[in-house]
Image (cartoon, helix red, strand yellow):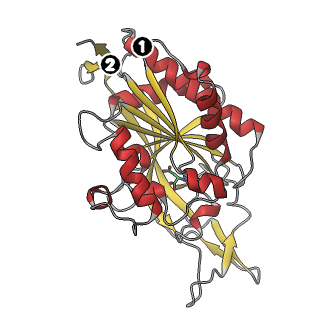
Amino acid sequence: MTSLHSVVNLRDARKVAIFGGTHGNEMSGVTLVNMWINNGAEIQRSGLMIKPLITNPRAVEKCTRYVDTDLNRAFTPDNLSAPRNEDMPYEVRRAQEINQMFGPKGSPDAYDIIFDLHNTTSNMGSTLILESSKDDFNLQMVNFIKQAIAPTSCSVLLNEHPLLQYSTSRSIGKHPIGLEVGPQPQGVLRSNIFESMRAIVKHALDFIELFNGGMEFQPCMVDVYRVSEKMDYPRDKNGNITAMVHPNLQDGDWKPLNPGDPMFQTFDGSTINYEGGSTVYPTFINEAAYYEKQQAFVMTKRETLTANGIKAYKI
Ligand SMILES: CC(=O)N[C@@H](CC(=O)O)C(=O)O
Ligand SMILES: [Zn+2]
């Protein structure tokens, strides 16, 4: 391909974690991880240490997103370094425990790859979530997965925004990767969503095995949707919503929203249009968990990233 992008040598990846139940009511990840804890044959790969973990067992038990605070926002430097005490929110204590087991975040001891399994009530299909546009390993893995499941589509959401990025459970690993599959209601298990998630995890593990085995992956391009802005529902002065996602936008995740297109519908039937200056690609449209986060959907822009080729070197 180009001389700009070459093949780089990376250390092989030996320690892999699969997190489920970071949100206790997202049932595909909870069920798959519990299944793999009982019998890990399906996720074993030669030369790999693969550890499935229920990250928020109390929330899973209650079938709720979280108990005290959102675990997938809790892995901040402040939380992780706070002196331990019993009055801390449960999820902050749990974040410290998980960081000890799979991190420490930013250290050479951290797990190489952490998959975190989520479900959304939005019509997003299968989506891989990246936190860096520069991570050649993850970009190559995503490219491999996309090709493996084609013609079924798998979108890539890049959350690399200075203000909108958050401190995820997976962020303690060297190569954090989220897997978000929907639509699936909270607390519900749907076979199609479960199987899509399962297939993607298996392809990802195949990729890691091939990489460790010495396969060289050529430079590639990956189409991504980069998070640019979040959009709240229209609200009154008490904070109550005054409009719903417009029927034209509902379930239209990843479809272009052009200036002037309908966005919300008020209870008395009037339409609120998108007034932005350029086309965006909304996703997480009407996600149930985001009402409390004042978010009706997130806007993204399309971009093509280029990844270096990669090859493992052994030490
Ligand atoms: C619906 C949902 O929980 N989505 C995840 C996305 C992610 O893992 O980055 C979250 O907000 O934490
Ligand atoms: Zn989630």
Name the mark nearer the viewer: 1 or 2: 1
Q: Is residue 66 left or right of residue 104?
A: right
Q: Nearer the viewer, residue 257 or 125?
A: 125
Task: Locate the N terminus by quadrant.
Answer: top left
Examine the image and state in which quarter residue 285 appears: bottom right
User: Residue at point 64% right, 53% down?
Assistant: 61
User: Residue at point 37% right, 40% down?
Assistant: 101
**In the depicted structure, whether residue 251 falls above or below residue 197:** below
Residue type at mark 1? Answer: Gly
Examine the image and state in which quarter residue 63 appears: bottom right
Residue 37 visible in the shown view: yes
Q: Mark 1 and ligand 1: say if the CB distance to the nearest ligand atom is below 8 Å.
A: no
Q: Residue furthest top?
A: 214
**In the depicted structure, whether residue 11 falls above or below residue 38:** above
Q: Nearer the viewer, residue 300 or 187?
A: 187
Q: Position of residue 205 (x, y in %)?
A: 50, 22
Q: Which residue is mark 2?
A: 12
Q: Which mark is residue 47?
A: 1
